[in-house]
Amino acid sequence: MIFDEILRILGEFGRYQKIQYFLICMAAIPSAYFNLANSFLSASSDHYCLVHDDQTFQDTSHLKNCTIPYDAEEETYDSCNRYDVNVSMGIWPELCFQEYDTLECDNGWVYDRSVYENTVVHEYDLVCDKDWMKQLSKSIVPFGNLVGALLCGQLSDIIGRKPVFFISLISSIVVGAVATVSQTYIMFLICQFLLGLCSTGMFLVGFVIGVELVGTSYRTMCGIVIEIFFAIGYMFLAVIAAIANGHWRKIQFVGAVICLIYLPYYWLIPESARWLIEKKKYNKAEKILHKAATVNKVKLPDDMFDDERKGIMEKNEGAEIEYKEPQYTMAALFKTPNLRNRTINICYNWFAISFVYYGLSLNTAALGTNPYTAFLVSGAVEIPAYLLCWFLLDKVGRRWLLCSFNVLGGIALIISVPPENVNISAALAMVGKFFIAGSFALVYIFSAEIYPTSVRNAGMGLASTWARVGSISSPYVMLLIDVWYPLPYLIMAIVAILAGLLTLLLPETNGKDLPDTLEEGELFGTKHYKKDQPPQTTEVEIQCDMDEMELGSVTDNHLISTQKGVVNGSFKKD
């Protein structure tokens, strides 16, 4: 029996699946927390040169007025230079009326701590000529996401979903605790890179577990609800940061502590039954499925995999070798034309959506003077976007809805070229984020449904990698404002609209059974895909010598699926 047939007996979303899926969704909260924490950990604030040990930012005495250059036009004090004046003997009125040369801050800085009590920028003085180090600390997490998408996606297809999920979880606890007591900037960077890697492992692999757990009619709901929990983690971070008054060590410590709650998951979350079946590990799959059947109060047949076991034995005897399931890598995504074209298309969509999402996010600070409130609103606006996707996804279909959200997000970006009224600009930016956030949810579902089980996590990992490239690139595109103010917005709009149009080249997955093998993935969306309308077949075994990675070909209504040393030929009856 194939997994989709088992689900029809077990129930597509029974009590067992509901419990498991809720647990997986809860794990999206710490993933969002670590992914976005650097918005506060590396936050910057106003500053100027420290010239006396007892100096405070709010100091309005002659000490500040006579030692820090003041720009009357901008109404700000110089952040990186001071007057070359010796204040060790004190300040007297005549000192302020003398002309002095300026020099760079040589004794550190004094920071405005009214909003952020202590950030990495304050602690390691990442300002002025070290400002690039602040930007690096913010981009290192997306870089960790990139590596994590590649590594965790590939590993979970090879060794299983559960081991990778728990390695990521435990690593998040350990690395989060180490980051809390980091004594150097380099140690902080290393920890942030590893947390970026681990947060991707938890969310990406957890998402795949959730999708593989349920039947076709519930895939939409599962793909959307987990994104809502991610948005909850987004808002939870804003609340914790506000309570901690922006103290980066306290924020980091809370992130490590909340991961401890998930340690019992080792006994609560099983391996993906769909993955076990695809890997021919039928004994383990049966144990999990029978447990699920008990919880769902249904009865599964005891011999549900007998035919598969007999088939493997016959193949082994015929080929005179022990059957071994091939381990596919990301390279398998590019071996056949349909999978190759779809993979390139999906990767570009992930890049474009992430690129535009983070570009729009740069405007969230304009929502108000309180960064915690602005961040909370930025996360809250995503929830109605996900709910709208949930409502429309099965009615409109994946392909057209993703196309529409990308195009509308691009249009919003064009008209959000900031007018003189910053409030209007901020509101338009949030409209754009509404659509692009919805696109993020849609592309997760769409991608997971297009890729076959054997390479699903590898495909999702590759696509997520390109999303990280987009998130790393978007801040640098904003530098083009100095060339022509609307230019970065127009570039991101074109990128988003092009992604929407390319989406129309992908096959619709709404209401379709998921492909499991590479052969099914190649045929998915064509008239030859056998799961939609299972043909009557006559199977024959032919001895030949073929590479285990080679896919079958479809010619004259003959469907060939290959394994090492054996070819199963099926002839479709007209």
Image (cartoon, rainbow, N blue to C red):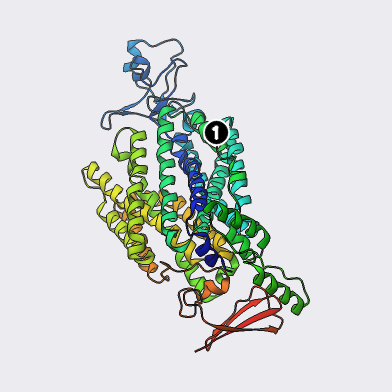
Residue at (41, 58) in percent of width and height: 220
Q: How many marks?
A: 1
- Between residue 359 and residue 407, name the one nearer to us: 407
**Residue 92 at x, y percent in the picture:** 36, 10
Can residue 299 be seen in this snapshot? yes
Q: Is residue 41 above or below residue 213?
A: above
Q: Amino acid at mark 1?
A: Val
Which image quarter: residue 379?
top left
Residue at (36, 38) in percent of width and height: 376
- Seen in the image, is 215 located left or right of residue 406? right
Q: Is residue 216 above or below residue 383?
A: below
Q: Is residue 158 above or below residue 229?
A: below
Which image quarter: residue 401?
bottom left
Residue at (35, 67) in percent of width and height: 501
**Residue 181 at x, y percent in the picture:** 58, 29
**Residue 141 at x, y percent in the picture:** 51, 45
The quadrant of the rendering that contains the N terminus is bottom right
**Residue 228 at x, y percent in the picture:** 40, 47
- Between residue 122 and residue 325, name the one nearer to us: 325
Give the structural element (helix, strand or loop) at label 1.
Answer: helix
- Seen in the image, is 498 located left or right of residue 120? left
Residue at (66, 63) in percent of width and height: 282
What residue sits right under mark 1 in the picture? Answer: 257
- Seen in the image, is 268 located left or right of residue 370? right
Can residue 329 be seen in this snapshot? no
Badge 1 crowding class, 10 Å Cα cut-off, few under 14, some 14 to 19, many 20 or more, is some
- Between residue 552 and residue 106, name the one nearer to us: 552
Which image quarter: residue 112?
top left
Q: Residue furthest right?
A: 320
- Seen in the image, is 15 located left or right of residue 153? left
